[in-house]
Image (tube, rainbow, N blue to C red):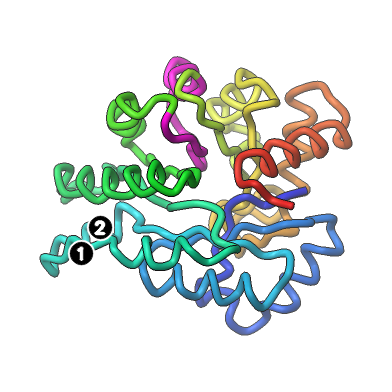
Amino acid sequence: MIDTHIHLNFEDYIDDLEIVILDAEKAGVTHMIVVGIDEGSSKLAIELSKQYPNLYASVGVHPSESENMFEMQATSTAFIEDMIQENKVVAIGECGIDLYHEDFHLDYQKEVFMNQIELAKKYQKPLIIHSRSGVRECIDILKPYQGQVTGVFHCFNGTLEEADEILSLGFYIGVDGPITFKNAKDAKAIATHVPIEKLLIETDGPYLSPEPYRGRRNQPANVKYILKALAQLKNMSESDVDDITTQNAKTLFLLP
């Protein structure tokens, strides 16, 4: 199993990081992609990837962090270009559009997002897309880049039609803890609808813990519950789903 989206660079894991990584390994997690949301967390993701052989890093500016940059009148994503040269950096992100909160600055988020798309194109790195309440905007921004960039819509929460558009752009879709929730009809419908060859499994820890740990801190070992739920939805064996989603992740992120 590969946890394609985990924030081990957050303070939530500062007291027991080695135990969390060991528990993941015991659960069968072979690779974990530690995802940055700003310069500091991206730098820490790289440091962790150097410290632990099975960790890899993604570097980028989360749309919520771009809002903070707006408040400070800062626009630079230059640090990404400096960090992208590190050999365990496998993606750019998470980046995208987040319109969940009322006080967003869409034009500014677009500018920061497009800067990162251009870097992904330049360095041929996949994008990890955050699209909470902004799936349509992300798709429209990416359309002119069809065939030039790829990546994953992490923790996807759009419609079936939007999922089809994303697949047509050459992107994967990430499924998370909500597919284990009894009443998460939309998440289950997406996971059922999208071909297994275009799905990635991810925890988004420390958030979105699956059942039976809902409401607690999430961790990469819990990706096994997402795998199990996905296998049930697909009417496939857990072994086959593991093999296919692992290969998907290796193909997208060029993992060994």
30 displayed left or right of 106: right
Mark 2 nearby-residue class (10 Å; few <14, some 14–19, many ≥20)? many
- Point 72% across, 57% down: residue: 31
Q: Position of residue 252 (x, y in %)?
A: 61, 40
Determine the image quadrant of residue 39. bottom left
* Residue 15 lies in the magenta stretch: no
* Residue 160 lies in the magenta stretch: yes
Q: Which mark is residue 69?
A: 1
Hey, what amino acid is under mark 2? Ser
Hey, what amino acid is under mark 1? Met
Determine the image quadrant of residue 12. bottom right
Q: Magenta residues, as a range? A: 148-167
Q: Which type of secondary structure does the marked residue at label 2 adopt?
A: helix
Give the Cα separation between the discs numbered 1 and 2. Answer: 5 Å
Q: Nearer the viewer, residue 177 or 201?
A: 201
Q: Nearer the viewer, residue 214 or 103?
A: 103
Q: Which mark is residue 132?
A: none
Q: Nearer the viewer, residue 184 or 133?
A: 133
